[in-house]
Structure formats: structure tokens, C-alpha cells
Amino acid sequence: MKTASFRFYEELNDFLPEKKHKKSFSYRFSGSPSVKDAIEAIGVPHSEVDLILVNGESVTFSHHLSEKDNVSVYPVFESLDISPVNRLRENPLRDTRFILDVHLGKLAKYLRMAGFDTLYERHYSDSEIVDISRNEKRIILTRDVGILKYKTVTHGYWIRSQDPVEQFREVIRHFDLYNQFQPFQRCMHCNGVIEKASKSQVIQHLKPKTRQYYNDFYRCARCNKIYWKGSHVKRMQELMNSIEKDK
Ligand SMILES: [Zn+2]
């Protein structure tokens, strides 16, 4: 058996048992596995990793481990400038689109409310999610670490919180999306694009009080759901404002 020393930084520690948090530990291996395989064997999905240094030099996932290698592993930190070293991905996904696993229905609504193109269907299987992510360049958000271990996953994030509002905050913070809110762009129910609609176009579908008090309307081009800036919108706006203050 050979031994290498590993240290994981920042939120990558969430995948490790407490005794390995934020310190170097020994990893025993035989042969010459890729550093990617070693990282996943330790329990960290490769899609969460953005930078690997071996003995101080940046390497790619396919680098083969050698006896006594000193390995530092950093998470995806799009907002930091690490340009002099070798990032594992050529480009972060700047046109931020998501696909969510089946446990994240409420988070899907929040993200759509904020205008992000967000796919979510209760019937998606793990492999469907992985395929759609690759074909449509969508970031996978999941509570299930297993999905992120598929070889073909390049952009994924494991959601830590179990509370939907906290999950929303977490995503906005992690991907630095504070300046990308565009409310009234996406239908919360079907992810369709919503468009302005005149009152006369929607009036026959409105309840009497809505007819009386509101004049600006939007309609989903896909499922025809009608939106207006009522009290629920005000609450959502307050939520988004509170998240902007987290900056
Ligand atoms: Zn819709």
C-alpha cells in the first residue's frame, strides 16, 4: 500500500467525517488511481471540486496519485480569482440554469419566482437528470450526493439545508446570483416564460376582487396561468430583498 496526504477546503468538508475536517489526513491506496477516483472514494463528488493542487502544482482530474503526494482540494468558487492556476472546467456556466432532483419542489418554485430557468419534475430518475443536465448545460441541484458521482456530471451542487427558504439563500450565495434576479420571467408552476397580458385578455378568468384592484397582468405562455402583483408577490419580493442583503 502507498500513502498520500489529502486536505479539503471550505464546504468540501461537509462531505467528510468530522475528524477529517480542515486538516491533512492520510489516504492509503494501491496502484496509481486518478486523483478524481481518490477524491470520490474519500466521499467528495467531483462536481463540487474546482481546483486540485498536488505538491503545490495544479493538476487535472486524470492526474495519477503517487506515493507521498500532498493533495489540496478546493471547492467551486466562481467569485475568487484563481486564473493563474489550472481550473478543472474551462468556463463556469454563466447562463445559470438548473435541474433539480425530486426532493426540491419548493426550491424550484423559489428559483422560478426569481426568474431562473429551473427544471423540476417529480418523475425524473437520476440518470434522466444527469442526461438533461449534460444536454442542456444545467446545473444539478440535489440533496442526494449519489447523483453527483455520475462520471458525466460537470456542474452540480449538493444542497446542505433542508428548509426551502434556506436552500434558496444557499443557491443564491453559492453561485453568486444576487444580481441576476428577474422576477416575472418564469412561471412558478411549469417553468414556462411569462409575458405581459392586457387586462382585457385575462379579465374573464379573474375573481371579482382581482378585477377590481389590479390592472397589470402577466400570463404563462405555456400553461396560461395568470399572475399579478398581489400580496404573495410582495412577500416574495421581501424575501428576495432580504437575500440581497446577505451579500
Ligand atoms: Zn406555466
Image: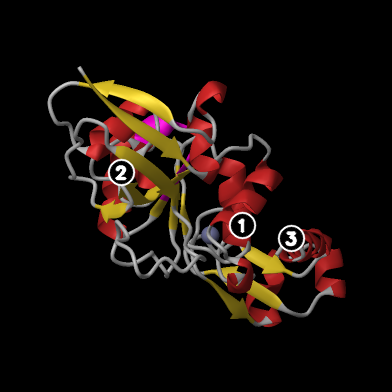
- Residue where numbered disc 3 is placed: 246
In-image side of 209 versus 170 (left or right): right
The residue closer to the viewer here, 43 or 113, is 43
Q: Which mark is residue 130?
A: 2
Residue located 62% across and 64% down the image: 114
The reply to whether dot 1 and dot 3 touch (C-beta < 8 Å) is yes
Residue located 77% across and 58% down the image: 239
The amino acid on which the numbered mark 3 sits, given as a three-letter code, is: Asp
Q: Secondary structure at mark 2?
A: helix
Task: Answer with mark 1 or mark 3, whichever residue precedes in sequence.
Answer: 1
Q: Which mark is residue 173?
A: 1
The amino acid on which the numbered mark 2 sits, given as a three-letter code, is: Val
Pointer 1 local density, CA inside 10 Å: few below 14, some 14–19, many at least 20? some
Q: Is mark 1 within 8 Å of ligand 1?
A: no
The residue closer to the viewer here, 16 or 98, is 16
Start-end of magenta stretch: 140-147
Q: Secondary structure at mark 3?
A: loop
The amino acid on which the numbered mark 1 sits, given as a three-letter code, is: Arg
For the N terminus, give its image quadrant: top left
The reply to whether dot 2 and dot 3 touch (C-beta < 8 Å) is no
Mark 1–mark 3 distance (CA, rounded to whole Å): 8 Å
Pointer 2 local density, CA inside 10 Å: few below 14, some 14–19, many at least 20? many
Task: Answer with mark 2 or mark 1, whichever residue precedes in sequence.
Answer: 2
